[in-house]
């Protein structure tokens, strides 16, 4: 019995080679995507033109001392000029302040007018600091930020319940440096890093942690040993995704839950109907839907269902592989039937 050799057309092999090359190119491109570093409070974004800010001239009277590590004054008794070190926590980076949300404010909008004179009276240290709701609550101008709802969530959080009035907005959001990030940042990596640094300011720094409790600071890496690929989770997911009660009506959750209630199920994030789409990716998905329609917005967004990596490369590869596989099968079947 004679058998005829079944030689597949060379162009099918060529298609498969091109497919492999395309997949390799897409993977390498996703691996080499640069991550833009986020300016921290210690870094200076650059010299700013202070004439752009209406209260800069008055604020500079404060920055003359609080904007550097030392200050000078004339001793009225000895008539000598004295140089002193500025207490570290009272030194402010003026460049960071002038890109923060409160850059248009006068220092005395939040601090007592008595600070305008030097030396400052000792009892001024006891002044009560205003919270977000004191200025932004009940104001239609800020209604879209839902400060009242944020306040309610915070009051129900473990931070507020455990520390009462000792824990204020400023424990997490420094009034001199705070900058709304999640609603304006196109790079999710920067958003994630910015938000997680807020948590690590206490949970990763014993100097701040011990101001609130006498308990030993927990080892974050050990507490999260159960996480597979731990480093990837830390750099691609905000702490609040697992440690806060997420609400669809708020961009950033403030209802921090006890550690026993933290999310520990993989499918909570690794699914299309996940907490990441309800919070971290929410505003980006909404923008995508408005620009490209529901189908493209949901299926081809920056988020993927198999991991919070902000890349749709795997979606593209999957669709290309599936389409070409079906095409090859159809052509192969057609040629065999024809023979």
Image: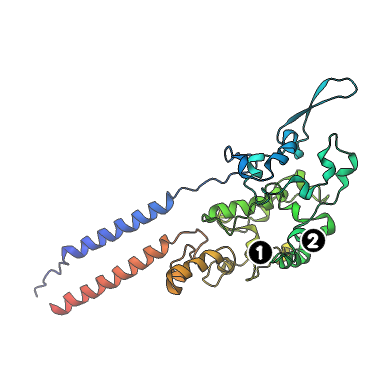
Horizontally, is 318 left or right of 251 in the view?
left
Q: Dot 1, how many residues are within 10 Å of its Cα: few (below 14), some (14-19), or many (20+)? A: few
Of the pair 232 and 316, the residue shown nearer to us: 316
- Which residue is drawn at the image coordinates 49% and 65% (left, top)? 306
Of the pair 62 and 157, the residue shown nearer to us: 62
- Which residue is situated farthest in the left direction here? 2
Q: Give how far across and how far down residue 155 sits, in percent.
A: 78, 65
Which secondary structure, mark 1?
Answer: helix
- Which residue is drawn at the image coordinates 51% and 62% (left, top)? 307
Report which residue position mark 1 lands on: 145
Of the pair 56 and 32, the residue shown nearer to us: 56
CA separation, marks 2 and 1?
A: 20 Å
N-terminal of the pair, mark 2 or mark 1, is 1
Of the pair 225 and 71, the residue shown nearer to us: 71
Report which residue position mark 2 lands on: 160
- Which residue is drawn at the image coordinates 43% and 73% (left, top)? 295
Q: Give how far across and how far down residue 191 sits, in percent.
A: 58, 54
Q: Quadrant of the C terminus?
A: bottom left
Q: Give how far across and how far down residue 133 sits, in percent.
A: 76, 61
| Res. 57 image quadrant | top right
Q: Dot 2, how many residues are within 10 Å of its Cα: few (below 14), some (14-19), or many (20+)? A: some
Q: Give how far across and how far down residue 249 sits, in percent.
A: 64, 70
Tell me, for residue 53, which label it has, or none.
none
Horizontally, is 117 left or right of 299 in the view?
right
| Res. 55 image quadrant | top right
């Amino acid at each position: 019995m004679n058998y005829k050799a079944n030689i597949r057309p060379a162009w099918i092999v060529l298609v498969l080679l091109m497919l492999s090359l395309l997949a390799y190119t897409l993977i390498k491109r996703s691996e080499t995507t640069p991550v833009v570093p986020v300016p921290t409070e210690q870094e200076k974004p650059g010299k700013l033109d202070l004439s752009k800010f209406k209260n800069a001239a008055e604020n500079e009277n404060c920055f003359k001392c609080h904007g550097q590590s030392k200050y000078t004054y004339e001793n009225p008794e000895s008539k000598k000029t004295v140089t002193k070190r500025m207490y570290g926590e009272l030194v402010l980076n003026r460049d960071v302040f002038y890109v923060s949300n409160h850059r248009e404010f006068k220092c005395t909008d939040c601090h007592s007018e008595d600070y305008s004179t030097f030396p400052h009276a000792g009892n001024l240290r006891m002044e009560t600091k205003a919270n977000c709701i004191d200025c932004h609550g009940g104001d239609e101008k800020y209604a879209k930020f839902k400060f009242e709802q944020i306040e309610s969530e915070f009051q129900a959080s473990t931070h507020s319940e455990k520390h009462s009035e000792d824990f204020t907005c400023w424990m997490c959001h420094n009034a001199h440096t705070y900058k709304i990030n999640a609603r304006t940042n196109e790079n999710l990596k920067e958003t994630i890093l910015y938000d997680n640094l807020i948590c690590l300011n206490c949970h990763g720094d014993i100097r701040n942690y011990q101001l609130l409790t006498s308990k030993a600071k927990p080892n974050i890496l050990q507490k999260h040993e159960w996480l597979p690929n731990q480093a990837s989770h830390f750099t691609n997911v905000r702490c609040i995704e697992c440690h806060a009660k997420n609400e669809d009506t708020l961009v950033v959750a403030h209802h921090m839950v006890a550690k026993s209630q933290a999310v520990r199920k993989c499918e909570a994030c690794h699914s299309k109907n996940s907490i990441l789409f309800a919070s971290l990716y929410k505003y980006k998905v909404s923008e995508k839907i408005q620009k490209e329609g529901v189908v493209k917005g949901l299926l081809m967004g920056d988020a993927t269902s198999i991991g919070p990596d902000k890349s749709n490369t795997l979606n593209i590869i999957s669709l290309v592989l599936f389409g070409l596989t079906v095409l090859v099968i159809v052509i192969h079947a057609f040629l065999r039937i024809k023979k």
